[in-house]
């Protein structure tokens, strides 16, 4: 059974930082690309950051470039999202996603709430 479990969400003031973690089980973690998505109320789910399975190449949504950093630890089957200089518009449920290219399939975590408010 594949499981992705996010943690590290919470409430923080603007300008603050949070570090999200996602523990993955049930798959060969190192073979999967990993990403973080988020969904704010009334908005579509959007890609925040992605890290490839080979080489650990990263990419980010324009809204978070320079503020967020995605990383992975294949030995622990974990992926992280370090979020700095948080803004109220970063408020959303953040989801961990594991994806495999061929054949294309993916898995999702249940999400963790991040609230940025003064």
Image (cartoon, helix red, strand yellow):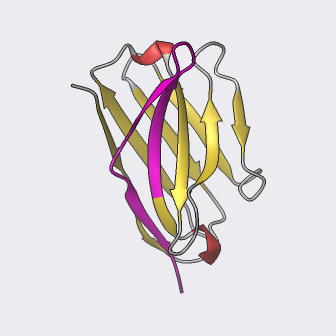
Magenta span has 36? Answer: no
In the rendered view, tell whether residue 64 sits above or below residue 36.
below
Quarter-wise, where is residue 64 in the image? bottom right
Q: In the displayed structure, does residue 62 sit left or right of residue 118?
A: right
Q: In the displayed structure, does residue 3 sit left or right of residue 40?
A: left
**Quadrant of the frame with the N terminus:** top left
**Span of residues in magenta:** 94-118
Q: Name the residue at the bottom extreme.
A: 118
Q: Tell me where residue 77 appears, x and y as whole percent.
A: 38, 23
Q: Tell me where residue 82 appears, x and y as whole percent.
A: 56, 48
> Which secondary structure dominates the residues rendered in magenta?
strand
Quarter-wise, where is residue 112 in the image? bottom left
Magenta span has 103? Answer: yes
Of 84 and 115, nearer the camera is: 115
Q: Residue at x 76, y 51 (%)?
A: 65
In the rendered view, tell whether residue 30 sits above or below residue 5.
above
Q: Residue at x 48, y 51 (%)?
A: 19
In the rendered view, tell whether residue 63 sits above or below residue 101.
below
Q: In the displayed structure, does residue 87 sit left or right of residue 118?
A: right
């Amino acid at each position: 059974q594949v499981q992705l479990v996010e943690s590290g969400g919470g409430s923080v003031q603007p300008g603050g930082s949070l570090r999200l973690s996602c523990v993955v089980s049930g798959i060969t973690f190192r073979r999967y690309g990993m990403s973080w998505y988020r969904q704010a109320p009334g908005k579509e789910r959007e890609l925040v950051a992605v890290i490839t399975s080979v080489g650990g190449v990263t990419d980010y949504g324009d809204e978070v470039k320079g503020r967020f950093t995605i990383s992975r630890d294949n030995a622990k089957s974990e992926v992280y999202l370090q979020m700095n200089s948080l803004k109220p518009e970063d408020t959303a449920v953040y989801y961990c996603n594991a994806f495999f290219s061929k054949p294309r399939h993916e898995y999702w975590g249940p999400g963790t709430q991040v609230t940025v408010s003064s």
